[in-house]
Every structure is written in C-alpha cells, then in structure tokens.
Image (cartoon, rainbow, N blue to C red):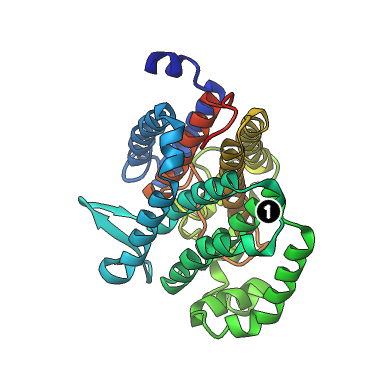
Amino acid sequence: MIFQKLKNLNYLLIFLLILLSFIGAAGLYSAADGSYQPWASRHLIRFYVFLLIAIVISTIDIKLIYKYCYLLFIISLLLLISVEVIGVLGKGATRWIRIFGLSIQPSEIVKITIILALAKFYNDIKFENVKKISYLFFPFLILIIPFIFVVIQPDLGTSLSIIMLGIFILFIVGIRLWKFILGFIATIISIPILLQFIKPYQRERIISFLNPESDPLGQGYQLIQSKIALGSGGASGKGFMQGTQSYLEYLPEKQTDFIFTLIGEEFGFLGTIFIICLFILLIAVCYFISIKCFHSFGKILALGVASNIFIYVFMNVAMVSGLMPVVGIPLPLISYGGSVMLSIMISMGLVLNVDLNYNLKKIK
C-alpha cells in the first residue's frame, strides 16, 4: 500500500521543490563568498530531511489528519504561547523556542495548522451556512488568537501574513464580498489605534518605506541598498558570485530576507523572473490538485497552502523591491532558515497527501 502511494506521488511538485532548494543553496554558497559553510550545506541537509518528512506525511491516512486538525492547531498555539515564557531572543525579538536543541519558530508552524483548522471547519458545515455571520465567529478566533501572540513577539511580517492567509481562505470558501469591504474599512479606521501598539523601530520602518532617503544610514539603509543591487543587475546580471553590493557587504541579511536581491544582482531581471515563474508553477500545481479533488477538505487545504506560498513570495519580493515596508519575510525554500522550510515542507506533504486521496467523495 505504501509503495503504491510512493509510486503515485506528484513528482512534478517534488521536482519543483528540489529545484528551488538547489537555487537557494547556490545563492547561499555565493552569499558565503564561495563556501558551503555556514549556510548552503545546512540548507541542503535540512531540505532532504524535511523532504523525507513531507513524503511520510503524504502516506498518512488523510482521515486521520482530518480527525486531529483542531488538536494540531491547539498544540501549535500552545507552542506559540510558550514563546512568552521560554522564548529565545534573536535579532531583537523573542520568536523562537528550543526543543531538543533545535530552534523552532512556532509562528511559522501555526500558519499550517490554521489552514488545517479552517479546512476542517468549512468541510463540516453546510454550504448555505458559509455565508452566515454567525459562522464567522470560530474562524475569527482561529485567526485573531495567533495574530495577537505574534504581534506581541513582535513580528509584524508574520502577523500580516496570518491575516492575509485568513482573508484568502475565507474568500476561497465563498464569504460574501461586502464582508471583506466592511472589514477593510474597519481596518483603515483602526490604523491610528493600531499604530499605538507597534514598536518604535516598526513605526520607523513604515516611515522609511515612504521615504528611505530620510534616514539613509539607519532604517532606510536596507531598502536603499536592495534597490541599488537589484538595479545594478540589469537584464542578465553581473554573473555568479560577481555581485559587488553583496561582496562588499553593503547588502544586509543577504542569506535570509534579501537573498532575492542577491540573485537579482548576479542573474539580473531574467534570473528573478525565472524564480518567480517557478513559484507560479508550484502554486499552479497546488491549485490544480485542489481543482481535481472531490472533497471540500482537500480543496481548501491545497488552496490554503497555495495561498500561503503566494503570500511568502509576494511579500518578500515586494519588500526587497521597495513596494512595501521591510517586515522580515523570507523567500521560501531559497532563504536560509529552518522553521520556514519545515513549515513549507510539512504543507507540501499535506498537498501530496491530498493529491493521493483526491478521489474520496467525502471526509468525515
């Protein structure tokens, strides 16, 4: 049975994951001045370990996953809450916890369990109830509780991505448009209040986004250097390991949040478009798996994962190109970081599982 499942795995999806991870390893090799240490080798080791985890997840009975969706969400939420008690400080914020010697960022894991919880909820209710306001209360709790704890850490980028993910899923399941418009208006009205709760450096990031030249050596430095690097890459780039902004250490966080900029400088506009096209293809594969799936749980799960990947890519590319404030969102499978890769690979395992069980009429 297991061998039959392995034979029927979506190998196009797996190929795209491998290709993106190898591009990430090449970028990290360049970021370390032509060395596999300290980033590229760890990146590849993590990927292969997490790929094995994804394949194992793909073989689990999908009804078992469905059964424990809420429990998985509660566990991830408890891990997120535990950050306030046993969290590890890093980069000016407390976002990580250490488990068996490994640093894990629970806010990345909770995104996947949010998708699972919402997929189970909307799979269980009747279609005519989806549009009722009373049935928005539980999804609202699923989103707002993690959002609050992530904001406290503080992590503006991840908190925004949680809200965006929730909006995408609610739109997918058929929530009426006027409710989104009403929510958008309420958000605009509440901005002055929300600004009182963000940290001073986060407020400065927003101001520097609007006018980075006002503080070129402070909050505006990252964005200015990123734009210079991207622009200097031109159409075809300066060549592998030839990026001057990177090698002269002008480009900050080149192994994590700004690796797209490094690739843009070395491989130019064509290189960045190639990466974006790979992500579009990855999202499209998840989308088509959702389309062919017979049961609502799988449809929502696959589209939720596709939406999550889109949010990662959109926010990272927009951030490094100056279309939105620098909020610390990595590029999945390419940026260095274990928690994000683990989260993405778990979600890919779930999508592979949906693909193997697409012909089930109903999951209860």
Residue drawn at x 52%, y 79% as measured from the top left: 198
Q: Position of residue 338 (x, y in %)?
A: 37, 47
Residue drawn at x 76%, y 57% as measured from the top left: 176
Q: How many marks?
A: 1
Q: Is residue 165 above or below residue 355?
A: below
Q: Is residue 265 left or right of residue 323?
A: left
Q: Nearer the viewer, residue 19 or 149?
A: 149
Q: Amino acid at mark 1?
A: Asn
Residue 350 seen in the figure: yes
Residue reaching furthest to the left: 100
Residue 227 seen in the figure: no
Quarter of the N terminus within the rendering = top left
Q: Nearer the viewer, residue 27 or 296?
A: 296
Are there few (<14), some (14-19), or many (20+) residues within 10 Å of tag 1? Answer: few
Q: Is residue 263 above or below residue 292?
A: below
Q: Position of residue 120 (x, y in %)?
A: 53, 46
Q: Position of residue 125 (x, y in %)?
A: 61, 48
Q: Position of residue 4 (x, y in %)?
A: 43, 13
Q: Is residue 91 above or below residue 238?
A: below
Residue drawn at x 70%, y 60% as measured from the top left: 132
Read off the residue under disc 1: 129
Q: Nearer the viewer, residue 318 or 33?
A: 318
Judged from the image, the secondary structure of the residue bearing numbered disc 1 is helix
